[in-house]
Image (tube, grey):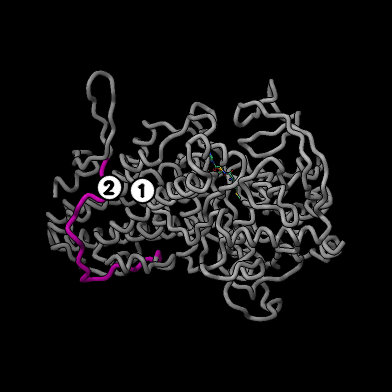
Amino acid sequence: MATRALLSSPTSLYAVTPFSSIASSRSQLIAASPYFFLRRTSLPLISSSPIRCFAHLRIDAEEVKESVKEEPFVLTTPLYYVNAPPHMGSAYTTIAADAIARFQRLLGKKVIFITGTDEHGEKIAAAAEASGSSPREHCDIISNAYRLLWADLGIAYDKFIRTTDSRHEAVVKEFYSRVLNNGDIYKADYEGLYCVNCEEYKDEKELLENNCCPMHLKPCLLRKEDNYFFALSKYQKNLEELLTSNPDFVKPSFRLNEVQSWIKSGLRDFSISRSSVEWGIPVPNDSKQTIYVWFDALLGYISALLDDGEHPNLQQAISFGWPASLHLIGKDILRFHAVYWPAMLMSAGLRLPNMVFGHGFLTKDGLKMGKSLGNTLEPKDLVLRFGADAVRYFFLREVEFGNDGDYSEDRFINIVNAHLANTIGNLLNRTLGLLKKNCQSTLAFDSITAAEDNSFRDAVEKLVERARCHYENLSLSSACESVLEIGNAGNLYMDEHAPWSRFKQGGVSAEMAAKDLVIILEAMRIIAIALSPITPSLCSRIYMQLGFSEEQFKALSWNDTKWGGLREGQTMADPLPIFARIESKQEGGDEVIHKAVKVKKKTSRNQGLVEA
Ligand code: MSP
């Protein structure tokens, strides 16, 4: 079999490419396997930070055969089922993907950020019927609700694919035919227990009492069908080899163990068509069957690459950026992405994505928040009450990316107030207040001159480098933490140096105070860049308070986090609160209502402003 012969080609010698070192240039890649690229590495550069940063992996120049155009960084969210409107669980993956996409853009990569909706199958047809609409109308409405929510959350995606798009259909059919021609599709009878919510046949062993699905807590139904099957079992060895030679294919590493144990326990062929489901893409040459939703939806990651109006063909789509650099998914759909999908791609002779990252669940009272259990949190409400930056920040900062995290409103308010309103907002506001009062809002020094021999500058440089490494490694919460540490250090610097009293002393002391303000504002500028993947509009407001324009903010790159952006003579904007503190107020009985309000509270942190 062609596939096997290819896989046995030599793959030794090479360190596996983690997501973070994903090719910035095709010329840096060495095709050691037809499915995934491996890169030879030199020793990692020594970093002052203790964090291992994959971005330091380099390639031996002699291995570079030819220089070809830069490869894009393609990242995907799952394509969301349109059985119900989006909830906070669906928004979570997309917010994380957006932060990663923004970070990669700051690094100067050409990013293709793909999201979209998964619109075929039994579950969707049933939801449409229940709502009294045709499947098409129903899909239009819900798919649009996703787009609207992404806009509310400040999600800057590049491609939005709907699996009911006719171009997608053409790509799926072509892919199906390739797999068929490779001898990996056959017809057979199947009887098993089916979970409609998972859209998957289940193993009896994994079910709870009364054959209930452990995820959706609803009984699975006994189904018997004459279906087309995909010969997954043929790829057992190839998948084992893939994961051994490329352990970074599945992240975090504890999810890799899970995938390896599924494979080890033996892979069974799975059915890729349904005879009982009309709402789907017809199987080529058998219009009585439709293609199984997963075999259809996964191809959305490829068909999304097509541009509007292009003749829809698989090779064309591939040429626009396949393979994906990163599939971001929730842990419940790991098997589809880390087992089924690579086997399907191998069968079709296509390259594999570089990495599948399975994050944890947002939970409520310990149970997965979801449409099926009806215990969801409305992202739209959260955005309306607290703003997109607060929502984005809380979930990315509070939930360690990869693990589960529980939502609590009190925690939300405490974190957001402490970090965004106090540590960052208040520091900026009181520094600008002092600058206005004592220096007519104009910088008296370049930030480089102001920080000569200053250890605070060293600390900021280390922290921003650490944040970069955390972003590279998808440790989004730690990236937020490192940036916030700059804010904490800034507040400490302010309190220790007390520029308000130095201004009062005049002479050299006042000059030192003016330098201190430049130093803190330079740190603020760096925070605005380094936190911009997480809280883009807050960071743009910070940047504009520092006297820059929106265009200048949009044109920033990660290199601009280097110390030295603020120059003598630059005039700052009038100090305005950049983040509204969320206040709780008791209204009628015991009901507590929280909302974002612009209240100036006298805390020890704004002491400088009061005294100055
Ligand atoms: N349609 C499939 C994906 C096909 S991808 C080619 C699907 N859709 S889904 O709408 O059910 O789920 C989409 C994503 O949302 C999954 O990654 C899932 O893990 C995520 N989440 C849904 N609820 C979630 C939480 N409560 N918490 C975090 N993410 C969760 O599966």
Read off the residue under disc 2: 579
Crowding around mark 2 (Cα neighbors within 10 Å: few <14, some 14 to 19, many 20+) is many
Q: Say if residue 155 shows up in the picture.
A: yes
Crowding around mark 1 (Cα neighbors within 10 Å: few <14, some 14 to 19, many 20+) is many
Magenta segment: 561-581
Query: Disc 2 to disc 1, how far (Cα)?
Result: 9 Å
The majority secondary structure of the magenta stretch comes to loop
Q: Give the side of residue 400 with respect to residue 458, left or right.
A: right
Vertical placement of residue 575 versus 207, above or below: below
Read off the residue under disc 1: 389
Q: Quadrant of residue 188?
A: top right
Q: Is residue 572 magenta?
A: yes
Query: Could you tell me which secondary element the residue under label 1 belongs to?
Result: helix
Q: Residue at x 40, y 64 (%)?
A: 561
* Front position in the image: 468 or 11: 11
Asked if disc 2 and disc 1 are in contact, CB closer than 8 Å, the reply is yes
Vertical placement of residue 312 versus 395, above or below: below
User: x and y percent of residue 504 in the render?
Assistant: 12, 54
User: x and y percent of residue 500 in the render?
Assistant: 17, 52
On residue 240, the disc is: none
